[in-house]
Amino acid sequence: MAIKVYPVASTNVKYYTTDHISMNNNLIKEKTIFNNGFIVSALTTPDLSVNVSSGECRIQGKYLSSSTTTNVLISANTDSYNRYDLIVVDVSGEGSIKVIKGTPSSNPTIPSASNNQIILAQVLVGSGVSSIQSSNITDLRSTNNQYFMESLDKSIHNLETKTTSIENKLAIKREFTGSGAVKKIIIEDNKDSRIKRQYLKCSLTAAEWKTTWQNLNAGTNNNNGGLWVGFYDSVNVNNVIDASLNISNINKWMWLNKGSSKLGIAAIGGINSSGCYVFLENKFPDETTIGIDFTVCITEKY
């Protein structure tokens, strides 16, 4: 049958071992050991064998489960040289936990495992030894492109949590409500680039703009025409690499008539650790309906 749905209660659909292998292989393709299973250890009273704890694994779409400790015999080494053996899970046939015997040599190498096998440990079998000690066993379960996993869903959740944690550490965004002319503060701290930006979103009504701006030609003084904008976080002036002023919500009424704007020069003046002066020239301070919205952005490197 070319098309199959799984599962379906129908006598017309038959499932085969190859179908299950194909489905499983699409879920987890890599050699995977679940829940820290298949630990290889020496016996309490050592002999020429090792114990392999219970465990579960997947490999090439196949699943193998061992519910008890398995004892694996190691062949005696009567050669004058040492050798390395491998303890593996083998999913060919009905499945097994077995040893792959190495070759004695003055410079012994580890034998190879097949694609149907997950390597659990290497065992040094010394010349003429009568037992395998813990010091002769090297855990290889997380080597050779093999992986540990508690469960697929938990691994996904852990990955999501770690990703969120990394993102939070790399870029932290904070928002606050301001006071006075400052209506909202947004602080972005990018720990990867070590750049911190402090956005101060401000708004002035026509009356507030009039009182904060003093037309210099009028001969009166109000901070020399400047508006004080306080920072939420203090700033190291020596680390400030940019200070920008952006005017927003401009519409045609900002221009009282063709070529004559209520807004004149707009700029940031002196900056210190607690705030800065903003200059927003009001060419027609007696106009009573047009206010102004603007954002101050202070960029600091640390």
Image (cartoon, rainbow, N blue to C red):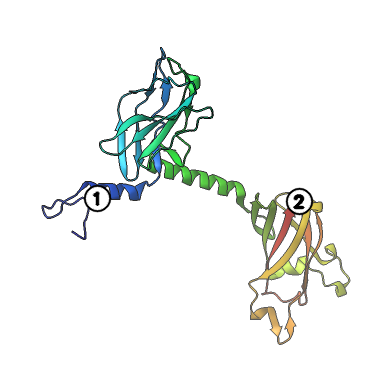
- Please give the residue where the numbered disc 2 appears in the rendered image: 235
Q: Looking at this rendering, what residue extends furthest in the top direction?
A: 45
Q: Is residue 115 above or below residue 288?
A: above
Is residue 188 visible to the viewer in this orientation of the structure? yes
Q: Where is residue 258 in the image (x, y as percent from the top left)?
A: 71, 87
Q: Position of residue 139 (x, y in %)?
A: 47, 29
Quarter where residue 56 is shown = top left
Q: Viewed as shown, does residue 217 lie left or right of 240?
A: right
Residue closest to the eye, 147 or 104: 104
Quarter where residue 48 is shown = top left
Residue visible at 40% across and 20% down in the picture? 76
Q: State the SS at label 2.
A: loop
Q: Which of marks 1 and 2 is nearer the N terminus?
A: 1
Q: Position of residue 168 (x, y in %)?
A: 57, 47
Q: Looking at this rendering, what residue extends furthest in the right direction?
A: 219
**What number is the disc on residue 10?**
none
Q: What residue type is labelled 1?
A: Asp
Residue closest to the eye, 45 or 114: 114
Q: Which amino acid does label 2 sit on?
A: Val
Residue closest to the eye, 294 or 54: 54
- Callout 1: 10 Å neighbours few (<14), some, many (20+)? some
Q: How far apart are marks 1 and 2 (CA)?
A: 64 Å
Residue visible at 70% across and 68% down in the picture? 246
Q: Looking at this rendering, what residue extends furthest in the left direction?
A: 11
- Please give the residue where the numbered disc 1 appears in the rendered image: 19
Q: Looking at this rendering, what residue extends furthest in the bottom direction?
A: 258
Is residue 292 visible to the viewer in this orientation of the structure? no
Residue visible at 72% across and 76% down in the picture? 287
Q: Viewed as shown, does residue 229 lie left or right of 90?
A: right
